[in-house]
Image: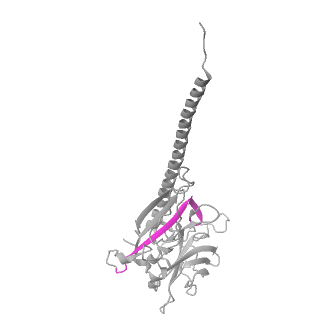
Amino acid sequence: MLKRGFSLIELIVAMGLLAVVLLFVFDSFTYQHETYTVVDQISEAQQNSQAIARLIERDVRSAGYMVPPQAASCGVDSVAAADILFVSDVDAILPADDLPLEFAGELLGAETTDDPTSTGSLQVDVDDVVLDGTASYDVDSDGTNDSDFRVGAGAILVDRGNPGRGVACGTVTAVDPSGPSVTVNFQAVHASAAAAAKDLVIVPAHVYRIVTGGGPPQLERSGVLLAKDVEDLQVAWFYDDDTDGVIDAGEVRGAAGANYLTNAVQGDELREIRVNLVMRTRADDPRNPDNAGIGQARENRNTSLPGADGKHRRVRTATVRLRNLTL
């Protein structure tokens, strides 16, 4: 019997069909890989936002511990950029059971002439740079803790004698335990000096801020990187101005239509803080690299938002009651 092979036409048809099948297979594989990449990045953004929110919630909830109530929190509010949040550093203070009997906040006193009524750097002479007799941070890298303030972290300064002057806060740029003094770049300041005698008190603080330039935006806590690709941080402060136990519509600062001004609040009337985090994926969506998402407006942020790009975004919002100011 004569054996026959495939004809040239049959081979061409078979190869064409195989090419079509392989094209669909590789196209499906590519799509699934791109989908996996996007889902993985979105999951990463969600997990990062959850971890960061828990840390911020913990710091906000504990703010005001063993310090004057008006020194619990401060901030820099912006409608065209990320906000900056300062909360008193509970990590620098011993638990109540371990505090020395003489601890009453008096060690926090600052010279009355060191009163920040304009932004910029100011050396604040203090009674001590240690609040409770036990230093928490090593500021001169000699292996021994010598201060409760640290460079890169924050400081909140209030006038206990005139609480209506608001709160002042800024980033610590230098600490001199032997001075003793703390140099602070104040970004939020008091109202003009009152006629009554001043009673200035400064406390260490954690500071949350977004740093941009030279790479993706990143969220830092007291100068330490927490996460990259945190695009925005927006904060609202809830006050009980009329002390009726209810936060009315006009008592929210930092929200839409009501900017937060540190020199126009009375800090001990603060009750809650709402924090909004906008996370974005590290890379563009390969399936839609030019128009996958757009910047998110939160609170009173209304300008300079990122335009349409290839990144997906996730927003996490947490409202936290300050337990040390609402007992």
Residue 20 visible in the shown view:
yes
Q: How far across and down, in percent of the image, does residue 324 sit?
A: 41, 70
Which quadrant of the rendered structure holds the N terminus? top right
Residue situated furthest bottom in the rendering: 195
Q: How far across and down, in percent of the image, does residue 147 sit?
A: 60, 70
Q: Look at the picture and state if 219 lies above or below 112.
A: above
Queried whether the magenta region covers residue 240, the answer comes back as yes
Which quadrant of the rendered structure holds the C terminus? bottom left
Magenta stretch: give its range: 220-242
* Colouring mode (rainbow / by chain / secondary structure / one colour): one colour
x 44%, y 78%: residue: 267
114 or 300: nearer the eye?
A: 300
Is 270 on the left or on the right of 313, as rendered? left
Residue situated furthest top in the rendering: 1
Q: How far across and down, in percent of the image, does residue 191 sit?
A: 50, 86
Q: How far across and down, in percent of the image, does residue 296 sit?
A: 48, 64
x 60%, y 14%: residue: 4
Q: Look at the picture and state if 231 lies above or below 253.
A: above
166 or 131: nearer the eye?
A: 166
Is 173 on the left or on the right of 201, as rendered? right
Magenta: predominant secondary structure element?
A: strand
Queried whether the magenta region covers residue 121, the answer comes back as no
Residue situated furthest front in the rendering: 9
Q: Look at the picture and state if 238 lies above or below 231.
A: below
